[in-house]
Amino acid sequence: MRGFYSRKIHSLLGVIPLAFFFIEHMLTNFSAVEKGADGFKDSVLWLNSLPLVFFLELLFIWLPLMYHGVYGLYIAYQSKPNLNRYNLERNWRYTLQRVSGIVTFVFIIWHLYETRVQVALGNVTHEELGGVMHEIVPQPLWLAFYIVGIVAACFHFANGLWSFLVSWGITIGPRSQRVSSYICMGLFVLVTFMFLLSLVTFRDSEFKTAEAIAEAVNTVIQVRE
Amino acid sequence: MAETAAASKNVKFIITRQDDPQSAPYTEEFNLPYRPGMNVISALMEIQRNPVNAKGEATVPVCWESNCLEEVCGACSMVINGKPRQACAALIDNLEQPIRVEPMSTFPVVRDLIIDRTRMFNALKKVKAWIPIDGTYDLGPGPRMAEKKRQWAYELSKCMTCGVCLEACPNVNAKTDFIGPAAISQVRLFNAHPTGEMNADERLEALMTDGGIEGCGNSQNCVRACPKGIPLTTSIAEINKQTTKHMFKRWLGM
Ligand code: HEM
Ligand code: SF4
Ligand code: FES
């Protein structure tokens, strides 16, 4: 009985609030691409102007992340991957969901240490976080670390949505599960693209490159419309 | 493949053996004369007739289990060239040589290729995969089942508890107590039956206990491995829906 409920909570927290926070985080970062350094700063400040921000953060980020993350590590530990026997697309995604969960765990701890924990220690302010990222990104090894972490988190998010729909009995037949696969993998590509674009934006203090890419994308979208 | 077998007129087997449940497994090789249409069971019968291994030494015949010889009883399930399947339906002509034969290690090995599938039957008992109709008086005929529903339910009823789907599942292993896909699909079958439906909640509650449906991780190997083509992942998602609904109903006290 306990297993059923604790697993349902794990699954639910993966989407509410974690997936929603993930999207919110992506949009905040992307404001750096769209509106430059000031835009990013404004977005961060807006977030921190929310009332009771300490409790919001605790209730909607810290506790769910800890529960989902620690339980997720246990689920990953319990798995016995068999890609050698069943080299199939769904089995790959099953395995990658676990691998990306572990990578995301390590990445999130480090990323939080560099950003949120430093704010808590008083070493930087929220407004300076764009600058912190600006110093991290030009270092090739850290850039690689961030890229791996971001791609893993994006996959985990998108494929997690696919598996959530199955776990709650929303997509039941093979057809609906195939359609949701296409949508979720499309989402994976889109979300990865937006996070990585924000990442390279932090590299350039003038935000020239990313702005140019964003403009190019805008033009393409406008042309297609 | 087929050509090599025909050319050499010999079939090479590498069989994983084990003398008793406690002892360590080892492999033994056999070279058998090729005969047209032979399958893994007929090869094992040949070893039984003439128990001599590839080195020419006399050995103890390899033990296995089989009954129907037509892929309906599930008794002869074993891992052949890395894939769990029924030995009686494994034609030598379709297999790459040397042919590797192992027991399905998800289950306790009794001896050689014989495994103990008790957990499959315990799982059916746990989820009450039957329809209770016994009573102290005649209950009369039950409600009729729509023909369309009967047709897809029949597909689910083809399960022979062979255990291949458990062997294929990365979440069925020594670290978990996951019941496996077969029993979950049987709950869908009996919950779809007009009379069985009357006890639907009992079966759902059995799957909501530890080791129940929450053990599924959506690798979806089972549906690709099942020799009967049972839509196992559709059954699992459907039971995910039924258990989720049941959970909310119970909370609301309905
Ligand atoms: C902190 C490290 C994390 C670890 C170790 C982790 C681990 C896992 C694992 C192992 C699963 C598979 C569960 C299953 O298939 O039964 C899973 C599912 C999921 N995760 Fe995570 N996860 C982490 C972070 C996140 C984050 C940040 C998000 C949000 C973006 C997230 C969203 C999801 C979703 C939506 C599912 C699907 C739930 C389901 O299938 O029922 N996870 N996680
Ligand atoms: S569902 Fe298929 S693979 Fe699983 S036990 Fe039944 S027949 Fe075998
Ligand atoms: S002997 Fe019955 S399935 Fe092979």
Image: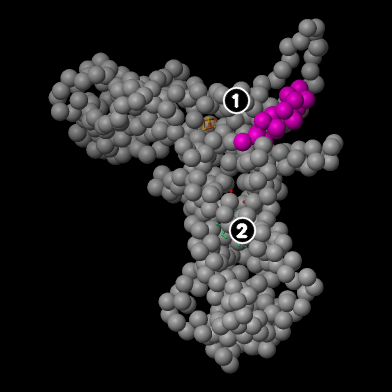
Q: Is residue B242 left or right of residue B53?
A: right
Q: Name the residue under label 2.
A: A66
Q: In this view, does B142 lie above or below B234?
A: above
Ligand 1 contact, mark 2 (Cβ < 8 Å): no
Three-letter amino acid code at disc 2? Met
Q: Is residue B117 above or below residue B222?
A: above
- Magenta residues span B195-210
The quarter of the picture where residue A63 lies is bottom right
Three-letter amino acid code at disc 1? Leu
Ligand 2 contact, mark 1 (Cβ < 8 Å): no
Q: Is residue A11 left or right of residue A105?
A: right
Q: Please state the chain letter of the residue tagged with numbered disc 2 in the rendered image.
A: A
Binning the other alpha carbons within 10 Å of mark 1 as few (below 14), some (14 to 19) or many (20 upward) gives: some
The answer to whether residue B11 is visible is no
The residue sitting at 67% across, 30% down in the picture is B206
| Residue A177 image point, x, y percent | 63, 50
Q: Please state the chain letter of the residue tagged with numbered disc 1 in the rendered image.
A: B
Rounded to the nearest angstrom, the CA distance separating label 2 from label 1 is: 36 Å
Q: Mark 1 points at which residue?
A: B124
The residue sitting at 54% across, 40% down in the picture is B223
Outermost residue, bottom direction?
Answer: A206
The colour scheme applied to this rendered structure is: one colour
The quarter of the picture where residue B178 lies is top right
Q: Is residue B71 above or below residue B232?
A: above
Q: What element carries label 1?
A: helix
Binning the other alpha carbons within 10 Å of mark 2 as few (below 14), some (14 to 19) or many (20 upward) gives: few
- Quarter the C terminus of chain A occupies: bottom right
